[in-house]
Amino acid sequence: MKERKSAKSSVQNKEHQNGAHLAPFKLAKLLDPEASWDKDQLGDVLHWIRQIVALVCGLLWGAIPLVGGIWIVAFLLISSGIIYGYYALILKVDEEEFGGHGPLLQEGLFASITLFLLAWTLVYSLAHF
């Protein structure tokens, strides 16, 4: 029984040393234009960047008592501009490999609108009423 456990652990150690496990995501890849991206990885990164922008804008819009639909449009323009700038100017990916500009710009859009509106409404209501 002990031999079986030690044999199993030695196989796991060899697999770990040979890189059989998933490699951790490196933050340096986020700014490397030479890095290769698959569709899921780039989509996840764009999604989370958009969520961070939504949270920051929602908190800021609520703290400064901004009201009106123009600020929703402003958020959409800022968020989409940051996403476009990130994948086109910083990463320099070929958008045609990922289905064009549309799918890349829509990645995480609806979830970010929800988060933005939630943060904006919550902070505005708590701070100014």
Image: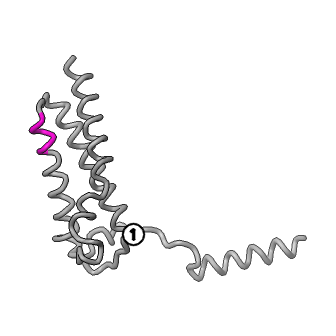
Residue 35: % across, % down = 31, 78
Specify whether 43 is left or right of 24: left
| Residue 84 occupies quadrant | bottom left
Residue 112: % across, % down = 29, 47
Instruction: Assign a secondary structure to mark 1.
Output: loop
| Residue 11 occupies quadrant | bottom right
Specify whether 80 is left or right of 7: left
Against 32, is 110 above or below? above
Specify whether 73 is left or right of 49: left
| Residue 118 occupies quadrant | top left
Colour scheme: one colour
The outermost residue toward the left is 70
Instruction: Identify the residue at image location x=13%, y=44%.
Output: 73
Disc 1 residue type (three-letter): Lys
Residue 44: % across, % down = 37, 61
Q: Considering depth in this image, is 39 or 123 the residue closer to the camera?
A: 39
Instruction: Identify the residue at image location x=39%, y=69%.
Output: 26
For label 1, count other residues whose C-alpha is less than 10 Å away and answer few (under 14), some (14-19) or many (20+). Answer: few
> Please, what is the dominant secondary structure of the magenta stretch?
helix
Q: Quadrant of the C terminus?
A: top left
Q: Quadrant of the N terminus?
A: bottom right
Instruction: Identify the residue at image location x=23%, y=78%.
Output: 94
Give the extent of the magenta segment.
69-74
Residue 31: % across, % down = 26, 70
Against 60, is 7 above or below? below
Q: Number of marks in the image?
A: 1
Instruction: Identify the residue at image location x=18%, y=31%.
Output: 63
The residue wearing badge 1 is 26
The outermost residue toward the right is 1
The outermost residue toward the top is 129
